[in-house]
Amino acid sequence: MVEAKPRSGDPDPGATGSWLHHLRRHTAGIAAPDPRLWALSLALVGIDAVWMRLAGIAVAPSGFAVAAALVTILLVAAACLATVKSDPPLRGMALASAFLIAFTVPVAVLHFLAAGLGLPFVDEALARFELRLGFDWTAYVGFLAQHPTLSWWLALAYHSSGPQVGLVVIALSATRRLGRLWAYTRLFSVTLLCVIVLAALLPALGPYAHYAPRIVPADHLETVGALWHLEPVARLRAGALDTLALGDLRGLATFPSFHVCLAILTAWALAPLPVLGPLAILLNAAVIVATLGAGGHYLPDLLGGAVLALAAIAVRRRARRRAPAVTGCPVRGAISPVDA
């Protein structure tokens, strides 16, 4: 019998199989925290593009191009660290950073655009609810004004929320707790999206604008998170925004508070770590308290953010109990089932 030889024009099955194998290895290495969330990020980019075109808003491309380039570089690095040279800690840092940028930027744009929907503000309802809870927000801010040192430290804690996200990525990657890192990024994404949807449907200007207190803390840190949203909200509602740059994006949500959500999720993520865990719990407890004054939030905003974060953690815990145990990882250095 004569062995059949492939003709020169026929594709080599071995080469095709090898190419597919390499593709699967690299994509498996950058699949975390969840392929569906990567798909959602792309979908959000498309939604933002269509919305901005319909609204007649142009894009200042420089900042967004830098963000896209950074995501690309981090993804390439993560893929190489999963296959070419296996290094789970560095891969975790690169991949988590890439995803957080790729998800947060289009979500922030969507949040900014949704602020121009023009739905009625719900400040009056939030203030009534706060009153029924027996909390006097104006008196609390007056107390902070009388204690400037306490006010300054609380404001500093409030503004630590963003840097703490980077700390979570570094700490969990360095200690090889990649499963917890992916869980944190998933919880971060889901709760952020929920906050943006609720804030779009229930917009509010915040207690500094609603109560207009005569006595406020003097330090500038106190008002950065409390008043910086008023001007862009007014422009968006008036249809006066022509161009959107990356630097224009800022938090516009009042109810519920994402700072409280993030404080609880960050404390939960770092809790198992010795020394750092207890410190993170104490710091984020201060962040939650600071959200009232430095963040310019009503008490119901804090309660809403806390309920959302705790519910997300509870749903994750319940899902893990129901999930079947899976062992093994088909690709060396890729995202294992435990991580996913």
Image (spheres, grey):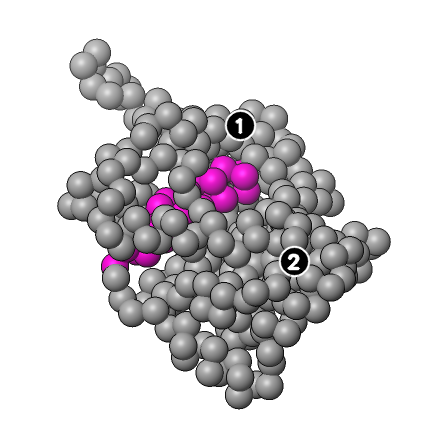
Left or right: where 70 falls relative to 289: left
Q: Is residue 215 magenta?
A: no
- On the image, the x and y values in percent for residue 41 come to 36, 46
Q: Foreground residue, 254 or 95?
A: 254
Label ID, residue 299: none
Quadrant (top left/top right/bottom left/bottom right) for the N terminus? top left
- Asked if residue 184 shows in the view, the reply is no
Left or right: where 150 falls relative to 113: right
Residue at image point 30% right, 43% down? 45
- Determine whether 27 is above or below 257 in the image: above
| Pointer 1 residue | 77
Disc 1 residue type (three-letter): Ala
Q: Foreground residue, 125 or 284?
A: 125
- Determine whether 28 is above or below 237 in the image: above
Q: Start and end of the magenta stretch?
A: 95-117
Q: Foreground residue, 30 or 96?
A: 96
| Pointer 2 residue | 217
Left or right: where 116 falls relative to 168: left
Left or right: where 73 falls relative to 38: right
Q: Foreground residue, 58 or 331?
A: 58
Residue at image point 78% right, 55% down? 149
Badge 2 or badge 1: first in the primary sequence? 1
- On the image, the x and y values in percent for residue 140 come to 65, 71
Q: Is residue 105 magenta?
A: yes
How far is disc 2 from disc 1 in space, using C-alphas? 45 Å
- Asked if residue 174 shows in the view, the reply is yes
